[in-house]
Amino acid sequence: MAADKQILNLNDIKQLVDTFYNKVQNNALIGPVFNERIQDRWPQHLEKMYSFWQTVLLEEYTYFGRPFPPHAQLPVEREHFETWLNLFNETVDELFTGDKATEAKWRANKMAEIFQIKIAHFRNSGHNIL
């Protein structure tokens, strides 16, 4: 059951990101992929994710990166994306309600779709991903 709290500010974004990535790190399927890639740089990764979601959901433009390239060569398949998305949606539903919560889940779903398509394309084409 979702809390009766909306995503309104950076502290809400941080709560969402921290809770979600705690689940990711401890997940049997996707945790090892993330932990191997990020290693001891979790604080930097979380800061980047705060900025990303702050930009996407609050329209406070603090993220200027390119989300896809760091993910392009990860050893991930459909089930990894499904797990990521399930954990994200579960986290949003546990913590928040309202329009921004709905938007967060919609955007996460679109990102998962697009990343899967792009990864498949680059794997099949043999082109440089970056």
Image (cartoon, helix red, strand yellow):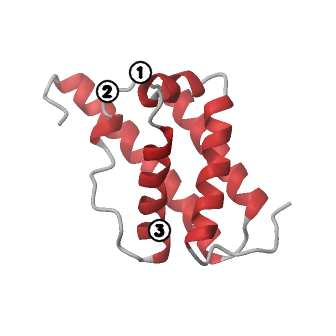
SS at badge 2: loop
Tell me if residue 72 comes above or below residue 45 in the rendering.
above
Name the one closer to the observer, 46 or 109.
Answer: 46
Residue mark closest to the camera, 2 vs 3: 3
Quarter of the rendering occupied by the C terminus: top left
Can residue 102 be seen here?
A: no
Q: Please provide percent x and percent y for residue 98.
A: 69, 76
Q: Which amino acid, by three-letter code, is at mark 3?
A: Gln
The circle on residue 75 is 1
- Residue 48: x and y in percent read 41, 53
Q: Amino acid at mark 2?
A: Gln
Residue 41 % position (x, y):
44, 36
Q: Secondary structure at mark 3?
A: helix
Res 28 seen here:
yes
Q: Quadrant of residue 117?
A: top left
Quarter residue 99 falls in: bottom right
Residue on which the image places disc 3 = 54
Horizontal side of residue 2 vs 104, given as left or right: right
Q: Is residue 28 left or right of residue 117?
A: right
Above or below residue 90? Residue 119 is above
Q: Position of residue 100 (x, y in %)?
A: 59, 73
The label number, if any, that marks residue 106 in the structure image: none
Image-based side of 22 in relation to 5, left or right: left
Residue 2 located left or right of residue 73: right
Eye-nearest disc, 1 or 3: 3
- Mark-to-mark CA distance, 1 and 2: 6 Å
Label placed on residue 73: 2
Residue at x-position 61% and y-position 69%: 11
